[in-house]
């Protein structure tokens, strides 16, 4: 993703993070370990699979309740970024309900999830690098 795309996604994530409910989500130690063991590319593939199966259909089964609260870094990221259900996608990302997501929209949602995970990992690493001087 180019810098302009990353900047736009960062701005969107920052805006969404101003909501106290969204701001409370961070990767837990087991989810950090999961990313460390498998890598961000594999986790990104998981994100694509989860989004395609659970969020992309026009009328997903159990919409609004289809994304678990944790257990995988993608699920935490989805709640943090408002990409967890079609209602949240409409409210936070202006992606309308009632139709399947396009490939470009799936790519965008996955990019938002990946970027949030990258940023949250940076948040965890920052105290480690500050003390290593």
Image: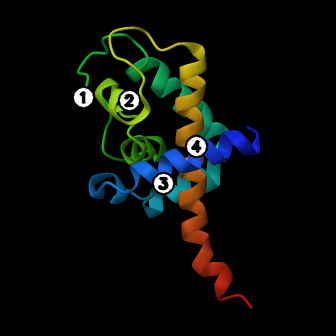
Q: How far apart are marks 1 and 2 (CA)?
A: 11 Å
Query: Disc 1 vs disc 2: Cβ atoms closer than 8 Å?
Result: no
Query: Disc 3 vs disc 1: Cβ atoms closer than 8 Å?
Result: no
Q: How far apart are marks 4 and 3 (CA)?
A: 8 Å
Q: On residue 110, which mark appears?
A: none
- Give the residue at mark 4: 9
- Give the residue at mark 2: 89
- Front tag of 1 and 2: 2
Marked residue nearer the N-terminal end (4 or 1): 4
Which quarter of the rendering shows the C terminus?
bottom right
Q: Give the SS element for disc 4.
A: helix
- Give the residue at mark 1: 64
Q: Distance between the residues labelled 4 and 1?
A: 23 Å
Spot occupied by residue 101 in the image (x, y as percentages of width and height): 47, 14
In-front residue for pair 30/19: 19
The residue that appears at 61% across and 53% down in the rendered structure is 118
In-front residue for pair 23/74: 23
Marked residue nearer the N-terminal end (4 or 2): 4
Query: Disc 4 vs disc 2: Cβ atoms closer than 8 Å?
Result: no
Q: On residue 14, which mark appears?
A: 3
């Amino acid at each position: 993703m180019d810098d302009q795309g990353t900047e736009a996604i960062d701005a969107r994530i920052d805006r969404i993070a101003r909501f106290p409910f969204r701001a409370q989500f961070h990767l837990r130690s087991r989810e950090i370990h999961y990313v460390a063991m498998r890598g961000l590319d594999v986790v990104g593939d998981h994100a694509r699979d989860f989004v395609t199966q659970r969020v992309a259909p026009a009328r997903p089964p159990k919409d609004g309740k289809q994304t678990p609260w944790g257990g995988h870094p993608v699920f935490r990221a989805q709640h943090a970024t408002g990409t967890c259900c079609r209602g949240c996608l409409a409210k936070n990302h202006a992606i309308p309900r009632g139709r399947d997501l396009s490939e470009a929209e799936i790519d965008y949602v996955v990019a938002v999830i990946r970027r949030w995970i990258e940023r949250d990992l940076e948040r965890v690493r920052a105290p480690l690098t500050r003390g290593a001087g």
